[in-house]
Amino acid sequence: MRILLVEDDSRVAAAMASALTRRGFDIEQASTAAAALAAAPCDLVLLDLTLPDGDGVEVCRTLRQRSAQLGIIAVTARGEERDRVLGLRVGADDYVVKPFSMAELHARIEAVLRRGAHAAAPRTVIEAGRIRIDVTARSAEVDGEAVALTRKEFDILMSLARQPGLVVPRDRILLDVWQTTWTGRHTVEVHVGSLRAKLGDPGLVETVRGVGYRLRVG
């Protein structure tokens, strides 16, 4: 189970990450709003609402807009009722006020994940315009015709299809597909070029210069 821990206090983050790792969770850390929004997909986010480069409330709102299934727990020193109400209204599944015990946090994590598991069956098919992706079978079709893709090409298509019609930054694709942003300068470009050729219509994957790529759905 993968958790994104968004916390700008390095000592607090280290203590939480250590405790959650011991409980069997795979932890990724982010200390800024920008890093949180650029992080690779995860199962649950522990989100501090006070961040050095932005309001965690807006981060929560954006993450919820991206995914209805993502678990989000606000973990913050903002304990006023109006803060708790706002956090829940913008998309948090739960709200934990500092200081807290790790036992309580662990129980709340389990409760959110349990609710998420019962809320919806796993989505195994993604349809984006002319493209249909079977996630379980790792297969793709364009206009009903099967397309043979390599593992990296399929993963890039998946990264784009999760947000059809929206720009996916190059670094986000690198994180989704290669789990790092430290790769050769033209790595993504080469694989996107190959993907375009196999899809049969280069215009299905649009380049947004200086930013990333977008899957055309209209």
Image (cartoon, rainbow, N blue to C red):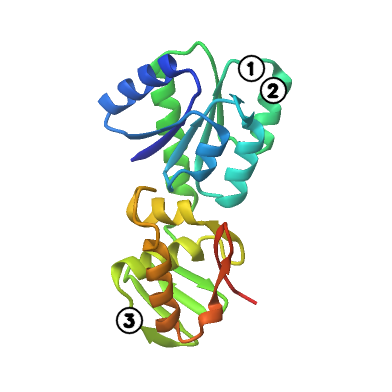
Q: Which mark is residue 148?
A: 3
- Write the residue at 42% across / 44% down: 42
The residue identified by callout 1 is: 78
Mark 2 near mark 1, Cβ–Cβ under 8 Å? Answer: yes
Toward the right, the furthest residue is 82
Look at discs 1 and 3 and give the one toward the viewer: 3
User: Amino acid type of disc 2?
Assistant: Asp
- Which x, y percent locates residue 199? 44, 82
Within-10-Å neighbours for mark 1: few <14, some 14–19, many 20+:
some
- Which x, y percent locates residue 121? 44, 57
Mark 3 near mark 2, Cβ–Cβ under 8 Å? Answer: no
- Which x, y percent locates residue 12? 43, 16
Q: Name the residue nearer the viewer: 102 or 161.
A: 161
Q: Which mark is residue 83?
A: 2
User: Amino acid type of disc 1?
Assistant: Arg
Mark 1 near mark 3, Cβ–Cβ under 8 Å? Answer: no
Placement of the N terminus among the 4 image quadrants? top left
- Write the residue at 59% across / 73% down: 216
Query: Callout 3: helix, strand or loop?
Result: loop
Say whether residue 110 is left or right of residue 165: left
Query: Callout 2: helix, strand or loop?
Result: helix
Earlier residue among tags 3 and 2: 2
| Residue 89 picture quarter | top right
Q: CA distance from mark 3 to mark 2?
A: 50 Å
Look at discs 3 and 2 and give the one toward the viewer: 3
Say whether residue 167 is left or right of residue 161: right
Within-10-Å neighbours for mark 3: few <14, some 14–19, many 20+:
some
Within-10-Å neighbours for mark 2: few <14, some 14–19, many 20+:
some
Q: Which mark is residue 207?
A: none
Say whether residue 110 is left or right of residue 67: left
User: Amino acid type of disc 3?
Assistant: Ala
Query: Callout 1: helix, strand or loop?
Result: loop
